[in-house]
Amino acid sequence: MYLYCPRHKLYSTPIYHSQKAVVTASHNTDPMATYAPLWLSTSPSTLSSPFPRVGRSFTWLASPKPQQVLYKRLSNSRASCIFRKDSERFDGLRTKGNGSKDGAGETDKTEEKSTSTPSGPVSSNMTEKTGEKSTSTPSGPVSSNKTETTGEKSTSTPSEPVSSNKTEKTGEKSTSTPSEPVSSTKTEKTGEKSTSTPSEPVSSNKTEKTMEKSTSTPSEPVSSSKTEKTGEKSTSTPSEPVSSNKTEKVTIPPPEPITSKKTEKDVFETEEKLAESLAKYVADLSKTYTKTGGFFNVVLSGGTLIRSLRKLSEPPYVNSIEWSKWRVFWVDERVVPRDHIDSNYKIALDGLLSRVPILLRNVYPINDSLLDEAAADDYEARLKRLVNNRVIDTSPDSGFPVFDLILLGMGPDGHVASLFPRHALLKETQNWVAYLDDSPKHPPKRITFTFPVINSSENIAFVVCGFSHADAVHRALESGEDSVVKLPVQMISPQGQVKWFLDKDAASKLKKLI
Ligand SMILES: O=C(O)[C@H](O)[C@@H](O)[C@H](O)[C@H](O)COP(=O)(O)O
C-alpha cells in the first residue's frame, strides 16, 4: 500500500494491511502540506477514493508489494510518512565523498560538506526499507534505516561505491535469545513494538586476523526473571485540522497496538559468563542492524565495560560480526589526549577495537586537540553533521539522535556516562553533548551525552559487576518511583529496550531475582 500525493506526484511509505493512519497538520511550506496523500488501493494506476482531510483517520487498504518505506517510526509508536518523488533520489544525498584520511578521529570530509549544522534537535527525512514483520518483542531496530550519504570510506578498497543512496538498514529483529540466564527480569512498560521478522544470519565478515578458535559455549547466567507492567501510552493525534502553519505528516500507528518496552536483567555467576552472554547479545543486535546493508551505530562507555566486551574479539564473533558495518561513538570521554591512559578511546582501542577488523574511519573519538567546552561542542557538531548526512537517525518526536545500542557502565554512586548525582547536567534537556570539569570520578574534565540523547537509544545495555555497585543496582531496579532523589541511573528511561548484565555481587541486594 502506498500513499500518493497527486499534486506533487509523490509516493510514500508502503503501509501494511489494516494499518490506520491519521493525517496531521502541516507547515504550508511543506510540499505535502496542502494535500493528504491519496490512497492507492492497489497500484498507482488505480487510485482509491479522494484522500482524507487533515485530522481524519483512514484505514490502509490491501497492500501490494511495497517498494520503499519512507517513514520514520515515531517514539510514541506513530510513524510520520515522508514522501519522496517516485523518480528522484533523496535530495541531500551526497555523491561519494572524497572521504578523509583513514584512521580514527579524522574528520570525515564529507561530514564537513553538510550545509547545515542544525542548532537544536534535528529532524530529518530518512529512507526506510521495509521493516519486515516480527512476532517477537523489539530488541532490534524499531525501524531505522539510514541512507548512506556520507563517504563512509573503508580502510580496505571498497568493493562498491562507499556512499550511495543505498539504504542501510531494515527493520529486522534479532532472534537473539541470550544463553539461558540463571536469573533475568523483564519489566514490561508501555512503549513501542517493532514489527520486524527474525533476521537470518548475515554472511560472516571474514576477519583479516586469525584468532584462536574459542571452545567456549554461551554462558548460563545465574538467574533471570521477567515481570510485566502495563501502562497506557498516548498516541495523541490532532482531532481538529491544525492551522496550516504546521508541518503536515501522515502519522501511522504500527500494524499492531503498541506493546511493551522491556527491561530485562540477567544475573551471572561470574564476570566470565556475563562476558559470554554480553558478546552474544551485542553480536545478535549487530546482525539485526547490519542485515542487508544496514550499519550498527554503537556507543561505548568507559570503565570496566570494555573488558567485559572482550569476547567480541574472539571466535566466533570476531569472524561472524560484520565489523565493517559498525560505527563506534562514546557516551562520555575524558578530555585528555587520545593516547592518555585515562582516555576511554584508548581503553576501547586497546581492549577491543584494535583486535577486530573494524574500520577505524568508522570510529568517532573526540577531537583531542580541543580542550574544555570546545571538545563537547565539537563532538555535538560532529554528531549533528552525521545526522544531517543521514548517517545517524533522529527521533522524529524529539529530534535527538537515535543510536542502535548504547553500552553503559554504572558507578557505585549510580552515575552513568559522566552524569553524576546532584550534578546540574542531570537537568540538561537541549544540548546533545555537555562538558563538565568537576567530575567526582577522576579525571575531572569530561564530555558526556545528555539524558535526552541516551534515552533516545533503541537499545541500552548496562554492564555492572562488583559488590560495590549492589546498592545502586538495587535502587536502580527496585526502588521504583518512590525514591525522593533519583540517581542518574534511575533517569535512564529510553523508548527502546533496556537490558542489565549483572554479576552475582552486583545483584546481591536485589530482592527479586527469580
Ligand atoms: O568514563 C567513565 O568513567 C565511564 O563512562 C563511567 O560512566 C563508567 O562507565 C562508570 O564509572 C563505571 O565504571 P566501572 O565499570 O569501572 O565501575
Image: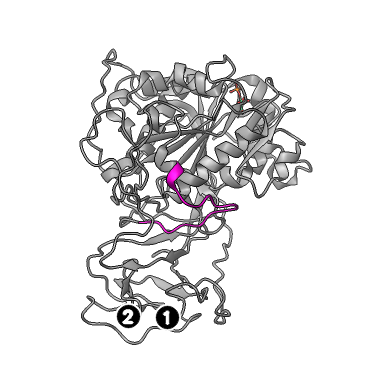
Circle 1 packing at 10 Å, graded few (<14), some (14-19), many (20+), is many
* Magenta span main SS: loop
- Left or right of 231 in this view: 181: left
* Quadrant containing the C terminus in the rendered view: top right
Q: In this rendering, is residue 111 above or below 93?
A: above
Residue receiving disc 1: 35
Q: Quadrant of ligand 1?
A: top right
Circle 1: element type: loop
Identify the mark at residue 429; answer none if there is no mark: none
* Residue bearing mark 2: 6
Which stretch is magenta?
Answer: 112-127
Amino acid tagged 1: Tyr
In the rendered view, does 120 fall on the left or right side of 483? left
**Nearer-N-terminus badge (2/1):** 2
Distance, label 2 to label 1, CA atoms, is 8 Å
Locate the N terminus and report the quarter of the image it occupies. bottom left
User: Residue 426: where, in percent of width, then height?
Assistant: 71, 41
Disc count in the image?
2
Q: Residue 42, relative to residue 262: is it above or below?
A: below
